[in-house]
Amino acid sequence: PVSMTFPIQSVEESQHKAERIKREKHEMSSDNGDKDNNGSKSY
């Protein structure tokens, strides 16, 4: 399967991407203030 042959670098890259998305999501939620703890936001 493809998951067996995944290079380590892509795993690290996806982790960095996840951290960046988490950080951006945190900044957006802190902009809303009251929606801080709620992950789902209605636009």
Image: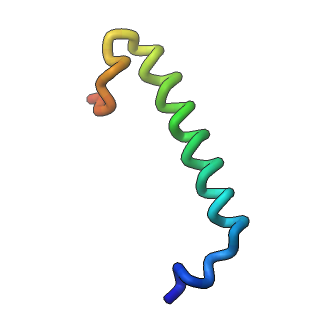
Q: Residue 28 location in percent, x, y?
A: 47, 24
Q: Which residue is farthest bottom?
A: 1
The answer to whether residue 22 shows anywhere in this view is yes
Residue at the image point whose x is 72% and y is 65% from the top: 9
8 to 36, vertically: above or below: below
Q: Residue 16 location in percent, x, y?
A: 65, 48
Give residue 34's quadrant in the image. top left
43 to 10, vertically: above or below: above
Q: Residue 12 location in percent, x, y?
A: 67, 58
Give residue 8's quadrant in the image. bottom right
Quarter occupied by the C terminus = top left
Residue at the image point whose x is 61% and y is 49% from the top: 17
Q: Residue 27 location in percent, x, y?
A: 52, 22
**Label tally:** 0
Residue at the image point whose x is 56% and y is 31% from the top: 23
The answer to whether residue 43 shows anywhere in this view is no
Q: Which residue is farthest top?
A: 33
Task: State the colouring used for the structure image.
Answer: rainbow
30 with respect to 34 (left or right): right
32 with respect to 4 (left or right): left
33 to 7, vertically: above or below: above
